Image (cartoon, grey):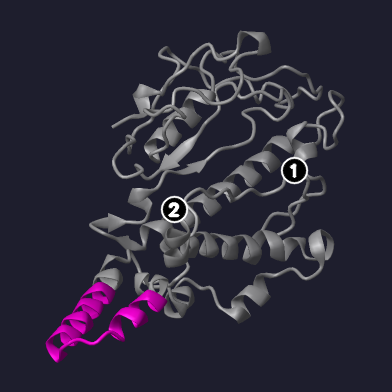
Amino acid sequence: MTEGDYRVRRGESAIDLVREDLRSYQSLKMSQADQRRISDWLDLLRSTEQTLTPAACNDATAVANGVTASAVDAASSGGGFGGGLKTSFTAGGDMMMNLVALSMICDMNRSIILAYPGYVTFGWDGIQHDADHHGLSHRNGSFEVGGTCKNGVLDMIAEIDAWYASKYVRLVTLLNSIVEGDGTLLDNTATMWLPELADGNAHNTNNLPIVIAGSAGGYLKQGQVVNLEGRSLGTGNSEADCRGDDTSVGFGTGSNTGNVPINKLYVTLMNALGCTAPGGGPVETWGQFDSRSAEAGITKPGEFTELKA
């Protein structure tokens, strides 16, 4: 991006970038007809700039998306991660989504990550837990491995998953409400819900469920469940412990697939967004290795063609 591109995206007109040269040119001796032509050209340029703006990036747009000084203040915990945790996760998280949408409307950022921390004890929106999310993912309510299952732990994890699902729906709905060209802002994005792990106890990504809304401008499939393993998959084994009369927390649960490296997903998304490899052409690799062997390097380069429209 050039300096000119940056300044235009910050709200300056292309005319502002050449203001001094333009003044020097307009000070030259010329006929009224020529002066009128310059004036008409400037009006046309400015009108074209405003027409090409995908959506108005101004105070009114911010207000329409819920971003006001008072709303930001109300969504700010003020007490750091301790006293303001409930506000941070509820109003604060929702405000971050509003800011994500506004940032995309203004084309200030094209790659945005919104992450909720895991070392928190849920105590809002009808959920009242007495152990933090990370401890619950270990099934015993602590950072320890193994031991005794915490009573009701699977139901608690389900409550947390449902809460995060509702937040993903909120973000997707918000992006889908913003008109952009012939579609919506959602249509031109790949808005992905990517859990950190498939099984918090086993710490693996086997059979990891990933949801992508939006086709990145038509690059990705939509409305489908895609099995990237290419074979029949079960439901996994992540709830094998702590169900029924089983009160012993094991380790190494979860489905035993792991044949498809997640690196290929990142490659697919980079190409969907128009990234290119250093030497030109589509991106083929991401990261340094895609298996348990760092020495092997990238063993399965390329995209997930199964995800492409």
Q: Position of residue 43 (x, y in %)?
A: 23, 80
Residue 286 or residue 251, whichever sits in front: 286
Residue 108 or residue 137, whichever sits in front: 108
Q: Position of residue 232 (x, y in %)?
A: 43, 13
Q: Residue at x 50, y 31 (%)?
A: 266
Query: Magenta segment: does it hold 32?
Result: yes
Give above or below for 131 relative to 108. Answer: above
Residue 238 or residue 48, whichever sits in front: 48
Question: Closer to the N terminus: mark 2 or mark 1?
Answer: 1
Q: Is residue 196 in sight in this rendering?
A: yes
Relative horizontal placement of residue 191, taking residue 70 as reference (left or right):
left
Q: Which residue is mark 1?
A: 133
Q: Position of residue 228 (x, y in %)?
A: 43, 20
Q: Position of residue 162 (x, y in %)?
A: 58, 46
Q: Residue at x 45, y 16 (%)?
A: 229
Residue pushed farthest left?
Answer: 33
Give above or below for 295 relative to 247. Answer: above
Which mark is in front, 2 or 1? 2
Q: Residues within 10 Å of mark 1 (few under 14, many from 20)?
A: many
Instruction: Residue 172: give its label.
Output: 2
The Cα atoms of the two marked residues, 2 and 1, are separated by 24 Å
Amino acid tagged 1: His
- Helix or strand or loop: what does disc 1 sit on? helix
Q: Considering the image in quadrants, where does the C terminus appear?
A: top left
Give above or below for 153 relative to 178. Answer: above
What is the magenta range? 19-47
Relative horizontal placement of residue 30, taking residue 216 as reference (left or right):
left
Amino acid tagged 2: Val
Q: Residue at x 35, y 23 (%)?
A: 305
